[in-house]
Image (cartoon, rainbow, N blue to C red):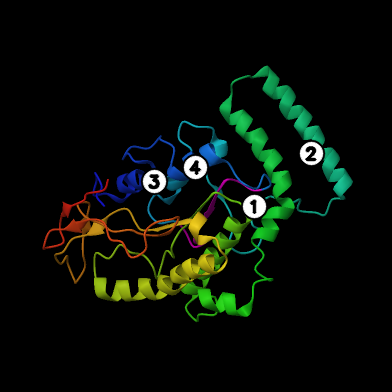
Amino acid sequence: MVSDNNNHTEAIIQFASGKILPGRPTVGAWISYGLGSENQNLPGFVVLRDPEGFPTSGKLMYQSGWMSPVFGGTEFNPTGTPVQNLAPTLPVHPAVQRRNLDFIQQLNRRHEARHPGEAELDARIRNYELAAKMQLEAVDATDLSRESTATMSLYGMDSPRPAMAAYARRLLIARRLVEAGVRFVLVFAPVRDANWDHHGDVKGGLTRACAATDQPSGALVRDLRARGLLDSTIVLWGGEFGRLPITQGQGGRDHNRHAGAFWLAGGGFKRGFTYGMTDELGYRVADQRVG
């Protein structure tokens, strides 16, 4: 894989949308727009990020661009309440809640009639409607209490490494969302132990990053296969660019936009197939360039 830019932000935008400049729909937004959601009570595009923060410019990976904001990614919390402000702070009787929602809907539609053609207004109304549907469905989709101990251990949720256990939880929730009919799930790796930006000590950094991500990532593929979901699900794992084949600073590696790697699983892809190769130094793509 290649990128047109060596900076994180521009490369991340290209990874998500195909161009280095912001403003275009990201791949998750396109899929949400084109295929919708198989479950009308959940968004078509869900984002599961590390609660500790984003990688550089991470939010740019799930923007809707010039399309309606309704097709952008919806952030779900991997712990606690799945979506912020989804349920009332104080308990409300279901009948009262229903009347409140119906009244808000009437006001929204009246306001929309006065301002036709406003994409953001339409998206806001649709999001309110979806939020009402999600109050039960989102909680159920992210509830891991019915998962077996063996499954949670397979992903590594019992790991003593906090970063690995948290990442494992996000991937297990991603599998549940796929089962529930969400079309596109974007999962971010841990910000700390799996920060792949190793400008120093690449050996130590990779050791920590791989220890935090390898088992959960492999478990996701195995779990999807065991449940008969892998053939209809594409798993894509990667980053915005590769690393130079020469040392930087104290044992680190700088960005390399000329050669990077991804792995794919499921979706009907041929198993064990490798596409593309670099020159003998590992600096530049020599054959079967992608991107």
Residue 201 in view in this figure: no
Which numbered dot is residue 84?
1
Give the dominant element type of the magenta stretch: helix, strand or loop.
loop
What residue type is disc 2 on? Leu
Q: Residue at x 19, y 58 (%)?
A: 277
Q: Residues within 10 Å of mark 4 (few under 14, many from 20)?
A: some
| Residue holding disc 2 | 101
Which amino acid, mark 4? Answer: Ile
The residue at the far bottom in this view is 160
Between the residue at mark 1 and the residue at mark 4, the CA separation in whole angstroms equals 24 Å
Q: CA distance from mark 1 to mark 3?
A: 25 Å
Q: CA distance from mark 3 to mark 2?
A: 35 Å
Q: Which mark is residue 16?
A: 3
10 Å neighbourhood of mark 1: few (<14), some, or many (≥20)?
few
Amino acid type at circle 1 is Gln
Of the two numbered discs 2 and 1 in the rendering, the one whose residue sits closer to the viewer: 2
Tell me what residue is drawn at x 30 percent, y 47 percent.
Answer: 11
Query: Cα distance, mark 2 to mark 4?
Result: 29 Å
Ranked by sequence position, the earlier of labels 2 and 1 is 1
Does the magenta run of residues contain 45? yes
Which region shows up in magenta? Answer: 42-53
Can you tell which mark lies on residue 31?
Answer: 4
Q: In terms of sequence position, does the residue under pointer 3 or pointer 2 come before the other?
A: 3
